[in-house]
Amino acid sequence: MAGRREWTCETLVAGVREGDPRALARAISLVENGDPLAYELVSAVYAETGRAYSIGVTGPPGVGKSTLIGALVRHVRAGEQTVGVISVDPSSPFTQGALLGDRIRLSDHFLDEGVFIRSMGTRGHQGGLAETTLQALLVLDAAGKDLVFLETVGAGQSEVEVISVADTVLLVLMPGSGDSIQALKAGIMEIPDVIAVNKRDHPAAKTMVNEVRQVLALDRERQWRPPIVLTEAVRGEGVPELWEQVEAHRAFLESEGRLEDRRRRNLAGEVFAVASARAKTHLERAVADDPELRRLLDEVQRRELDPLSAVREIMEKVFRLDGADAR
Amino acid sequence: MAGRREWTCETLVAGVREGDPRALARAISLVENGDPLAYELVSAVYAETGRAYSIGVTGPPGVGKSTLIGALVRHVRAGEQTVGVISVDPSSPFTQGALLGDRIRLSDHFLDEGVFIRSMGTRGHQGGLAETTLQALLVLDAAGKDLVFLETVGAGQSEVEVISVADTVLLVLMPGSGDSIQALKAGIMEIPDVIAVNKRDHPAAKTMVNEVRQVLALDRERQWRPPIVLTEAVRGEGVPELWEQVEAHRAFLESEGRLEDRRRRNLAGEVFAVASARAKTHLERAVADDPELRRLLDEVQRRELDPLSAVREIMEKVFRLDGADAR
């Protein structure tokens, strides 16, 4: 960051509203660190948000999510829309600083004022990734970005929580993503809105598409039938078609007030996710700081106090919940 | 269950101690339903637990975890050890009642007094699966089972929490489990203690073993190098070899006090997981029951109150945590 400029809430709010990349970079860092200034900033601009359209991109590591986001960004930039990208995937090349490499070829976007890209960690953040993702999305929304991509690595429930705030959820798979197919089939992974099967040159790509199609066919109740698009992110192939499907989903949501309904549910879900994450962090810190609570764990380990009785005592002490509440 | 016998805490404790299958079935149902009697029971027998050795079995859906557990049970029963099996995998054939079918061929175990098999759900249980799994394990431990298998479907963090109480964690993969390999490689999935590559007749089985081996080779620091065993669960092939590796891991843990250390960490982790799950459930119920808290969510949706301010108000109201605590 050039110049260690001191930001106040006012200058930060003004900078974010103008879409100043330095203000945005600072704001996201504050969000990442759980700084009180980030809270004030989002609180100040919240009334102006809700204009950006957000796309959550999930999938197992290694399927090419980052490359695909890069290709989508290039595609939508041709249409003049401004873009923000937030990656909370610890295995993402965005996170690992590989961005400037040839492989991702996103470096041109760094020279483009219309694009803001940032990876984020949690660093033991109280509200967890759900909080940082939501706040970062709101910052980019307030900065006037038309589109915001949220990247996360999709495995289980907690990971999906991170992007459940998105308007459209895009699942990226590749040939060999058998575990994900099984998880979709078993109902363990939620059905996304759009599916990309990346690395379409792979001999097994068509088979993978058929497998996904069979899984989706099991669910006939769904109003929106998730489209499946074959892509080759590295060469940008299938990317316009993929974007068309994202826009089709957006058009579907924007009709009959569905987008508003979805955002209502999403925001309520996020508030719960953040509150739960905070309760958990609070709990861990309380036990770490309190010799009496640590003593309870010792008693459990010596088989003198059963685990649920220890939980009860901890709930009473930390959250002031009595036995009946905590049960 | 034959005869709607009324159980008291005393008769239940006595029945569990004797390993009476009806008492066990009743006890696990009580655990599953979060019944206060389950709490009293575990509390009464806790001092006697810690004798069973537990094996957590995880992996994507469809890889044959249940069949492999069935084969392992058959193998260890030949050696006279008594066994309990708890499945918390919603996609497991144990759960879906397919147990009596030919495919699993576990039906013989139902006639075997030395084996107790049970699948469990959460049904909105306050302490989540972490609580039901832990309590069920303690019941079977108190019943004198030598070995307890815990089956869960492994995808993300929250799923793994369920079996993190186990002494040995066995990950089951099959050819096509590319997503899991990538997740292991990216450090998103924790390295298990033993790995089985099931469906070894598949032409890609050897390739899968090599891929797993390469991932494991990246971690040179590890004292215990997780062995990889090729199995064909349906025909019981590779099962004695797999069990040998589980026992080797057990021997490793039992030397130099490692088992005690691991159990200490596991129990503390379980107490946290249960307490966090309860805090979350408490939060959801509090908001559902309180018009004032629901009003906060409406304000968030109308962009009048930002999400973090709503979280703060909820934390204050529900957990009586002030702003500084909740931040």
Image (cartoon, coloured by chain):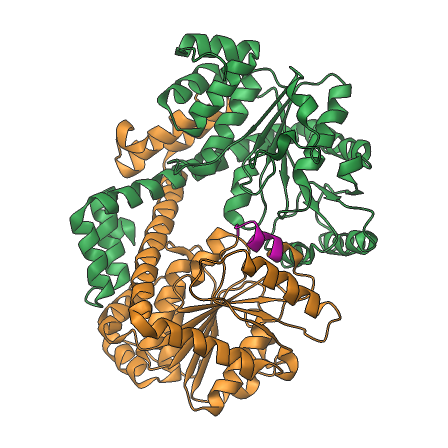
Chain colours: A orange, B green
Name the quadrant of the C terminus of chain B: bottom left
Closer-to-camera residue (B157/B106): B106
Residue plotted at (43% across, 23% down): B30
Q: Quadrant of residue A168?
A: bottom left
Note whether B41 is above or below B236 in the view shown.
above
Q: Which residues fall within the magenta stretch?
A: A181-188
Q: Is residue A255 visible?
A: yes
**Residue at x 50% of width, y 89% of height:** A111
Left/right placement of residue B218 relative to residue B21 reads right
User: Residue B6, image x and y in percent?
Assistant: 40, 11
On screen, residue A143 above or below B244: below
Residue furthest to the front in view is: A220
Left or right of residue B225, residue B118 in this image: left
Assign the magenta stretch its main secondary structure: helix
Q: Would residue A184 be counted in the magenta stretch?
A: yes
* Residue B129 percent across, percent down from the top left: 47, 37
Q: Is residue B109 left or right of residue B136?
A: right
Residue B281: give x, y in percent of width and height.
Answer: 34, 41
